[in-house]
Image (spheres, rainbow, N blue to C red):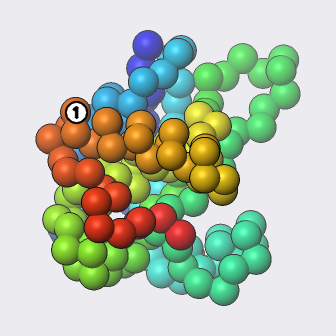
């Protein structure tokens, strides 16, 4: 089974990953059925607005996930939306000494795992999610994203 993506890039920055890169990262994530995900790349202001509206936090975060809540009678395999803030990803990659590409991959994997029901609010759940993220990142040829610091907020 696989996850297909639609990519919405609201920015005109030339150094952002393309659809093929995102699809490659998503293809490494285990899934039980055919699913669809929207990945939206946004600027600082849009993420600040979303994080305030949905999490009551006054900062732009790296990634937010919104599970699709469709009625049971709607037969669409939409898993949900993942919104990634490009400026925050770039800033965090530099601050954490990671390659920008590896941090993009990690935020993509992290966001989609949230859509699949994984969470990191409690220690035991965080350990499970982080191990899965690390395994997926290694499959993709990247280092453990949690070696030095935690990159999600």
Using residue 18 as the reference point, say whether residue 130 is left or right of it: right
Q: Quadrant of residue 139?
A: top left
Does dot 1 land on a helix, a strand or a loop?
Answer: helix
Q: Quadrant of residue 98?
A: bottom left
**At 29% from the left edge and 67% from the top edge, which residue is drawn?**
148
Report which residue position mark 1 lands on. 139
Is 98 located above or below residue 88 in the figure?
above
Question: Which quadrant: the N terminus?
Answer: top left
Q: Looking at this rendering, what residue extends furthest in the front direction?
A: 124
Q: Looking at this rendering, what residue extends furthest in the bottom direction?
A: 58
Percent coordinates x, y for residue 87 in the rendering:
36, 78
**At 65% from the left edge and 78% from the top edge, which residue is drawn?**
49
Percent coordinates x, y for residue 19 in the rendering:
28, 44
**At 51% from the left edge and 39% from the top edge, which residue is drawn?**
128
Q: Which of the pair 55/142 is nearer the observer? A: 142
Numbered label tally: 1
Residue 18 showing in the rendered view: no
Residue 101 showing in the rendered view: yes
Badge 1, how many Cα within 10 Å: few under 14, some, many 20+? few
Percent coordinates x, y for residue 85 in the rendering:
44, 69
Percent coordinates x, y for residue 77 in the rendering:
61, 23
Is 119 located above or below residue 136 in the figure?
below
Q: Which of the pair 28/123 is nearer the observer? A: 123
Is 123 located above or below residue 44 in the figure?
above
**At 76% from the left edge and 77% from the top edge, which residue is drawn?**
56
């Amino acid at each position: 089974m696989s996850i297909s993506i639609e990519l919405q890039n609201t920015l005109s920055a030339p150094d952002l990953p393309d659809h093929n890169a995102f699809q490659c990262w998503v293809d490494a994530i285990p899934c039980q059925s055919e699913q669809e995900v929207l990945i939206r790349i946004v600027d600082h202001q849009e993420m600040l607005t979303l994080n305030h509206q949905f999490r009551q936090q006054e900062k732009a975060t790296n990634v937010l996930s919104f599970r699709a809540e469709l009625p049971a009678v709607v037969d669409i395999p939409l898993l949900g939306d993942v919104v990634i803030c490009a400026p925050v990803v770039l800033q965090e990659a530099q601050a954490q000494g990671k390659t920008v590409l590896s941090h993009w991959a990690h935020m993509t994997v992290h966001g989609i795992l949230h859509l699949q029901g994984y969470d990191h609010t409690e220690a035991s759940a965080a350990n499970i999610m982080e191990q899965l993220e690390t395994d997926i990142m290694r499959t993709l040829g990247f280092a453990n994203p949690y070696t030095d610091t935690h990159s999600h907020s």
